[in-house]
Amino acid sequence: MSNDKTNAMRILDKNGVEYSVVSYPCKEAIDGVTVAEKLGAPVDVVFKTLVTRGKSQEYYVFVVPAAEELDLKKAASCVGEKSVEMIAVKDINKVTGYIRGGCSPVGMKKQYKTVFDISAKDKEKIFVSAGKIGCQFQVQPEKLCAVTGGKFEKITR
């Protein structure tokens, strides 16, 4: 794997956020629990990035623990929408600039309103996608949240 920096890494660099990059062999999108196994990390510190669209047609980003499910009602409520739904896999690249399995909460085409599950706040560091398949970064959740202009809320079931 090349050492090319992803857009997400460049943004963290620009904002002075420390992170470490961890790569693992992977050719296609895999679920977050499998990512945790490949990283040898506890599953509760590996987070997945989910993109939704609200009734208003605005997009929202939710970052939740790999083994958890996004609660769509709670998610909608915390961004002021009546409802939100997951975007179609075919739309991920068009909306975010990333591909399925390599979607980072940092460095999307636009900075969408971003919400991290409250459980991230208790962690010293979490893993999130660094912007490509097979590449994660480990970063302090408070700093990651600050870079995205996000907030912490209870958004899992």
Image (spheres, rainbow, N blue to C red):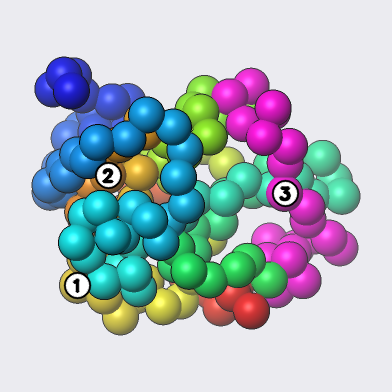
Residue 151 makes an appearance in the image:
no
* Residue at the image point whose x is 68% and y is 61% from the top: 79
Q: Which residue is mark 3?
A: 86
Q: Is residue 135 above or below residue 83?
A: above
* Residue at the image point whose x is 30% and y is 80% from the top: 122
**Residue neighbourhood size for the residue with mark 3, other residues' Cα within 10 Å, grouped as few (<14), some (14–19), many (≥20):** some
Q: Which mark is residue 110?
A: none
Residue type at mark 2: give it: Gln
Residue type at mark 1: give it: Glu
Residue type at mark 3: give it: Met
Q: Is residue 45 above or below residue 148?
A: below
The secondary structure type at the circle numbered 2 is strand
**Residue neighbourhood size for the residue with mark 2, other residues' Cα within 10 Å, grouped as few (<14), some (14–19), many (≥20):** many
* Residue at the image point whose x is 27% and y is 44% from the top: 136
Q: Is residue 63 left or right of residue 22?
A: right
Q: Which mark is residue 124?
A: 1
Q: Is residue 74 left or right of residue 16?
A: right
Q: Is residue 99 left or right of residue 19?
A: right
Image coords of residue 98 (percent x, y): 49, 28
Image coords of residue 70 (percent x, y): 63, 66
